[in-house]
Amino acid sequence: MRASLSIWLVAAGFGLAAAGSPAGAESGRMLDLTTRVPRNAFAAIPPQCYTRTRDTEGGVHNPCYTCHVTTPVPNYVRDGDLQTLYDFPGPARVNAWTNLFRDRRAEIAATTDDEIRGYIGEDNYHDVEGQPALAAVLADLPAGWDINGDGIWSGYLPDVHFRFDGEGYDLDPSGARTGWRAYGYVPLPGAFWPTNGSADDVLIRLPEAFRQTSDGATDWEVYATNLAIVEALVRRADVPIAPTDETRLGVDLDRDGQLATATHVAFAFDPRNGVTMGYVGRAAAALAEGHLHLAAGLFPEGTEFVHSLRYLDVAYDGTVGPAPRMKELRYARKTGWKTYGALLDLAMSDRREEHDYPDRPEHVLGDVESGVSTGQGWRFQGFIEDAEGALRPQTYEESLTCAGCHGGVGRTVDNIYSFSRKVDVPAGGWYHWDRIRPLGDLADPLLPDGVGEYATYLMRNGAGDEFRANGEILDRFFPDGTLDSAAAAALRDGVGPLVDPSPERALALDKAYRLIVVEQSFDRGRVPVLAPLDATVWRVVPEGSGTGIETPVR
């Protein structure tokens, strides 16, 4: 590391652990934001993949199916076989996520509830004028963050305000809509339940052409309609909309053969037989001219997502919800279009490389400023807390997990998890958690066999998290070691008893994560754990071992 950069990082708070840092903290550790040589060359493999799927009594648990599964084209990864074996490159069998094994119980106990409440209650995203504070820092770019040396931040400049109207639109301090829109969704089982560490939200924004009429005027009905069309394509389903005048838009949205008032967008995509869909407004012209594209299971180029990950706030009445303080701000942008054929070629190329060079780390393009690429047309970028709690850009290594989880598994729909899991009610699903309906009020979504998705996860995994370490869920749903069928069935009335932690657990998870922040040891894992996980996580995965799962879940 260059001396001048080292000095700058220490002065900015990236080098030394904060005062009062816990015993065992790596004091004086420095982060070089410019390096593209990761300590963990296999950081794209997330910690959850190191779970011991066999318990000490020989029982087999399957949390793997939530990510590794065969899904419809154009996701050609189709990695359901990873449910049955630990298919790691040789060097990756050594688990680099060593924070999973740190014993932080004494340090957690030494942090008072008032201390952590004060910390998580601070808003580290907005400045005093309600603007994104990080955007101002990036506009006056610190030298240590200027990777290409041009004096300009070339990545995402945070422009979400996290102030929402009744339709889920983000508003700037003047009350104008920014184009970002929040939506309610059902998180994948496990890691993204608040009881396992964090609260979160997701917002989508389509390019400006989707918000304009054919003559270039901003029109929010046009935008809402285009969002519904994209949703129908991604979810491969009809999507309800507010009553919309098809004559004004010039499109038969419900495909009933006439221009009238539509209350839904009908999904239809069979290009071999000439059946497809289209956008409305200026986006329709851009589609016709080849500047935009459309296909089932794919987002149009220029689509953006923002995902904030937050501490767990505990109100004095015991209610647990998202805290003002962000742990991370995650950003994704679709930078280019890939056809079904191109995506198939990429998947086959990856398979050949895995076969020919089984121990070679995946080569992921990117850097701190521009984010990392999945190779499938998306770039992912993140900001995370520094030792003092201010948001900073993620290092290249810290961003590798984004590429691994979003670009390398069968579960995603065009590299994205949440949008295909968007809910329809209330308000068409367009709302932020703090405005209309918290996650815990959602009903357990029913699978085709009539059983709830979350109840199914409990049955297949025998626990409420990948590591089988969430004692509260074990006590609530497995009181005698087997799943309480009545408790699982009750999730149809609301998943709160499963996804919401107790106040005590929420604050303990906050404290555990804050210790990682002070250390700046994210490259050793950012999952908050309340006790070492040696019993359920491999430190070294035995060579050639299987998971014990005999038949992959489709």
Image (cartoon, rainbow, N blue to C red):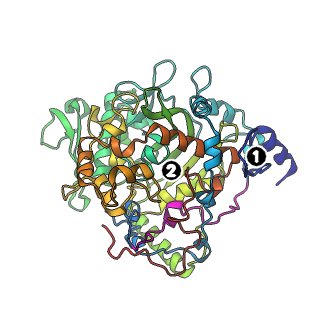
- Residue depicted at 57% across the width and 31% down the height: 117
Q: Is residue 47 magenta?
A: yes
- Give the SS element for disc 1: loop
Asked which secondary structure carries label 2, the reply is: loop
Q: Quadrant of the C terminus?
A: bottom left
Tell me the crowding category of disc 2: few under 14, some 14 to 19, or many 20 or more residues within 10 angstroms, Cα based: some
Is 420 part of what is drawn in magenta?
A: no
Residue 188 makes an appearance in the image: no
Q: Quadrant of the N terminus?
A: bottom right
Q: Quadrant of residue 90?
A: bottom right
When the figure is inspected, residue 84 is found, relative to residue 112, above or below; the finding is below
Does 471 sit left or right of 517 as displayed? left
Q: Which mark is residue 149?
A: 1
Q: Residue 216 lies in what quarter of the image?
A: top left
User: Which disc is residue 335 wearing?
Assistant: 2
Q: Which residues are magenta?
A: 35-58
Please state which amino acid type lies under the numbered disc 1. Answer: Gly
Q: Count residues near mark 1 (Cα–Cα under 10 Å), then give few for <14, some for 14-19, many for 20+.
A: few
Count of marks overlaid on the render:
2
View extreme (front): residue:
480
Where residue 200 sits in the image (x, y, percent)?
46, 40
Tell me which residue sits at (18%, 55%) in the image.
450
- Give the residue at x 54% y 42%: 508
Q: Say what amino acid the circle numbered 2 marks.
A: Thr
